[in-house]
Amino acid sequence: MKSTKNSKIVDTLGYLKAFEANKKEYVGKSFSFLLSKMDKMQPQTIWSVPSSGDSTVVTRSLFRFSDINYPVMNETKMMITWESQLPYKTVSFNNQRNKFYFSDSERRFYGTRIVKNILVYR
């Protein structure tokens, strides 16, 4: 659960599972489209997942919705699989520069990427 600016509590798992359940609306579209529909909460951090077959590319990214400094037990995460591979060096550079926070530069970088799959889990 996460508190929003207007003090309403959001069921993070339930909220994000709705995006997974309706993934046909987001698959094949830009990540910025998915982000634009997330009006109750936005990712706080991003973690790259290198391809198991080729460590020079990233095929999936893990988005977390709580502050990196306050780990949450049973935290809900969203795994996005990308339609096209991303260069690991670029992704890693962004991660290091922004200390894994999902900043404006990540919004621009990932915003144009096409979503292949959405998986939400705890």
Image: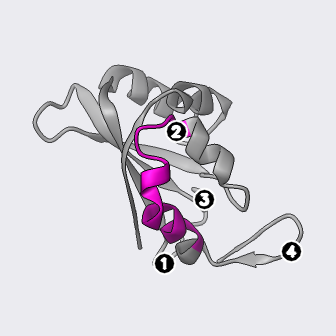
State the SS at label 4.
Answer: loop
Mark nearer the N terminus (2 vs 3): 2
The x, y position of residue 78, in whole percent, is 45, 58
Q: CA distance from mark 1 to mark 4?
A: 21 Å
Instruction: Tell me the residue that label 3 is attached to.
Output: 69
Mark 1 against mark 3, which lies toward the viewer?
1
State the SS at label 1.
Answer: loop
As for residue 26 lying within the magenta part, the answer is yes
Q: Give the residues drawn in magenta, as a range.
A: 15-31
Instruction: Tell me the residue that label 1 is attached to.
Output: 73
**Three-letter amino acid code at the position of disc 3:** Asn
The x, y position of residue 30, in whole percent, is 51, 34
Placement of the N terminus among the 4 image quadrants: bottom right
Mark nearer the N terminus (1 vs 4): 4
Residue at screen point 66% across, 54% down: 38
**Three-letter amino acid code at the position of disc 4:** Ser
Q: CA distance from mark 2 to mark 3?
A: 25 Å
The prevailing secondary structure element of the residues shown in magenta is helix
The x, y position of residue 85, in whole percent, is 29, 28
Mark nearer the N terminus (4 vs 2): 4
Residue at screen point 53% across, 74% down: 13
Q: Residues within 10 Å of mark 3 (few under 14, many from 20)?
A: few
Instruction: Tell me the residue that label 2 is attached to.
Output: 31
